[in-house]
Amino acid sequence: MLPGSMKEPLVSKGETTVVKSKLWFGYLPLWQETVPLHPNGKIDTVRLIANIMAGLIIGIRQTLSAIVSATLVFTTTSNQTVVDMFPFGISMMWWSTVAGTVWYGIFGRLQYNTSATQEVCAILYGAMAGKAATFLEDTPDKIPPTVLALIVTGTILTGFGTVAFGKLGIGKMMLSFPTPVTNGFLGTIGFFLVKQALQITSGVKFVHFYPISFSAFFAMRSVLPLLCLFAMVMVMRKGPRLLGSAFPKSKAVKKLGGLFCQLSPLFVFYIVIGIGRMDLDTLGEAGWVYPAQAPQSFTTLWTTYKLSDADWGVVAACVPDFGSLVLMSALCTMTGVLGITGKFPTGPDGDPAPDEGADFDMELATVGVGAVFTGLTNGVVTFHRLGSSIQIRMDGGTHRIAVFSSAAFVGVFFFSGIPLGHYIPKFFLGGLFMSSGVSFMESVIFSYQSMASSGLTLFGSDVPTWEYFGSLLCIATAAYTSPLGGIAAGLLVSVLSFLASSSSSTPVSSVSDGRFTMGRTFRPIWELKALRTYGDRIAILYLQGQLFFGSGQRLASLIAEAVESRHHLSYCILSFAKVSGMDVSAVDFLRSVQRKVARKGCKLIFCRMEKEVFSALSAAKLINSPSKELRDVIAGTVEQPRAMSIPNAIPEDEEFVDQEDVHDIGLGHRKTQILMLRKDVTFEPLEPFGQGNDDAFDHETDALDFCAEKVVKEVVYFQGAKLDPQLLQFRAACETGTRITESTFESLNSLPKGLMAEIKPSCKVLKDKTSVYFIFKGAVSMVDSIQLNKAREGSSLAFTLNVGVKGFHGRGGKRLRKRYPPGTVVGKMAFALNRTGRMLDDGVQSELVVSSRQAYGTTAELWELTAESWDSLSEEIQNALRDLLIVQQAEERQHTFLCGE
């Protein structure tokens, strides 16, 4: 499979014994896929016959469908020269069906899929043929070769376009079209099929949705065929159900009832003309059938018209119309594959990998190359025939021989040159059109039954949502313009609706302030009290959705309103975690509001951005001084930890270093690697790091800690503040990396004086993760590695779905849980569980590493107290330490609620 190709999982992967050989545009068939085999490898004759019969039955439908497609291409225009190409068109459609079916039968993945001409593309071909005929009214001899050139060119370009969709990996995106577009597309096709049915059967041309002459339409010459048309549609739609009710246990009725009801009007027609001894030539003059044509050799497909005689200027003028052909071909291929694999979740007998997912992009490549082949041989686009593919497998056509049998049946008519069009009454072709068209329109008209109500009522009934009326608008637009116009109307309505809903919806999913949402640095009680009092100077807005001119304007208004309502707001943090992208207008709105709030003393802080968002904001000078961590992530390089100068230090960077599972000493000291991330991002020159004016961060906790530091410094550690020496020493330890003394540690934690000196002999250099650690210098972070999170959440599922682990976000494959400054104790949970003999699962413990955020580049000093050393302490010291651990555990739990860990 190509890198980035997309799959639609059918069921869980199954074991396979045979591997199919893969080409760049498909697969090579296996013998076991081609014919049914016994376990001993011999051909299963009974099932072989069943496959051939199923293929022949579908061949009947394919033969008639080809005639229907030819009718749509060559008889829907008022130009007689194009209409005279109808016999040629039938030959073209038969050849396309044979070539397309055989091509997919050889190289396709689904061994029971049939490819054939499609009414959807036939309508588009017909529109182009009519357009060319209008251009060449003065030179009618150029019309046939030009129409052929249009069809051939359109088919080849469609093939190349479909292959490109597959190779670029964007095939599945076609399935994401808005509901109004897809429903409107089906309704538009249904409308055109119904209109063509009425037009072909009556012999009266239609303008938009009404006949050009009502008198001719209601004349007896037209009414009788129309009555036959309506009767045939009723038989086709109601007959299978009535037969099923009359013969509920008959398998033959269940399999062949639909085909019988479809062909019975044709049998009745020949019975009637046989009894009445009517001549087909006479019926042709009366408009019941097409005029007789002399039998022609199949070679006329390549000898009747020469492409060199075409007006290539007209072909060039129609090139824009090919876009809709490419689009519809790819979309119908995708929906066909989706429908077929949805009906049959597993492959049939003989499939070497019955549980393998359907590769949508490879399907596009197979169909695309096949279209190039048929185009080069004067054929049209063919792709998955959804109904026929499902029916052939239900009838027992499980192997490729069934597909080849259906192609052989159509090939008989193509190579024999039988003028079958003369023997098929027009009302019969119209009935095939109308039955499909009514089904399509029904699915659209009654789609409101499965839609939510808009909340409005009309005459006591609930009014559907706008999607329903958007679909109806597509149909109405197509009636007055063209199928492409209807589809364009659906896209326009969807875009306008999206803009309206996006502009009215809030781009802010939630909001908080620094009193209730804090960073993950475990702060002492006096700093927490300060933040609980003055934390409302910090606001954090969690943004969502796509930011463009509508939502961007609303976001700017919300930011301005927040600053206006809180005159003391100093920092407004914007989290872009759920923002997929933003356009230039949204950036302009943010730049404008940034200047506005800056005049009121508020600074915008940006965090958690995708690379595209960061690039847009930095290019607009909204971001001028990103934090060091964000710079490293954007640049795609991570510094190696510096060598430590004392033995009890732990060199590690909790946010950047990608680790290997090699433990040198305790607390997760590991070998490191360079982390490469987002190296394709470019941005404007930025302010030098270290200016203390950072305005962008990689994560919300970084931004919250930055802003909290500013607030705490302003309200607690301001110049001239009268603070206890212990508090000043703690602050210096956090800012400069100096060591706090034992007495300060005791004072900060309300421990008896001299206690730390007593336990110091019992403390050792770092050993394992089941001890408690008293932090005197530097800071320690508790982090989860991505491997640990995957173990907790189910790594196999996250890997299979190619998504991140739930709740995980961290740099360098790590997620910060909490950061412990000097004066705190870390490792309490593991210590308590280990000492009391409770379960301690190393696989779910967070790792402890030296923090890079506080006193970066300095050493750390920790005292380790093991369970064995604890037991050697006096009861009095144990009680004091036990109280310390309980209080810090409670404070830590409280902090967890505030930081949203």
Image (cartoon, rainbow, N blue to C red):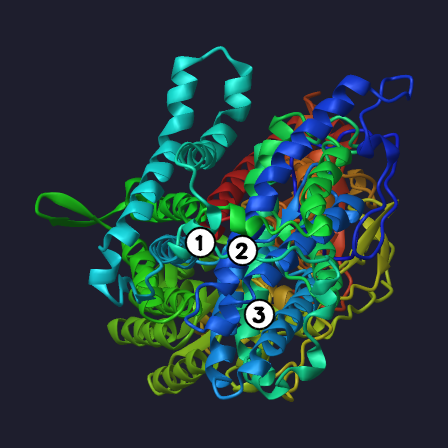
Q: Are marks 1 and 2 in contact (CB under 8 Å)?
A: yes
Using the numbered discs, state the Cα–Cα distance from disc 1 to disc 3 in whole angstroms.
80 Å
Q: Amino acid at mark 1?
A: Gly
Q: Quadrant of residue 569?
A: bottom left
Q: Report the front residue among 879 and 493.
A: 493
Whichever of callouts 3 and 2 sits on the residue coming sooner in the sequence is: 2
Q: Residue at left 41%, top 56%?
A: 285
Q: Which residue is mark 2?
A: 292
Q: Is residue 305 above or below residue 812?
A: below
Using the numbered discs, state the Cα–Cα distance from disc 1 to disc 2 in whole angstroms.
8 Å
Report the number of discs: 3
* Residue 558 placement (x, y as % from top left): 31, 71
* Residue 395 placement (x, y as % from top left): 62, 26
Whichever of callouts 1 and 2 sits on the residue coming sooner in the sequence is: 1
Q: Foreground mark, 1 or 3? A: 1
Using the numbered discs, state the Cα–Cα distance from disc 3 to disc 2 in whole angstroms.
79 Å
Disc marking residue 238: none
Q: Report the front residue among 719 and 465.
A: 465
Q: Amino acid at mark 2?
A: Ala
Toward the top, the furthest residue is: 249
* Residue 64 placement (x, y as % from top left): 55, 45
Say which element carries label 2.
Answer: loop
Q: Which residue is mark 3?
A: 697
Q: Which residue is mark 1?
A: 284
Say which element carries label 3.
Answer: strand
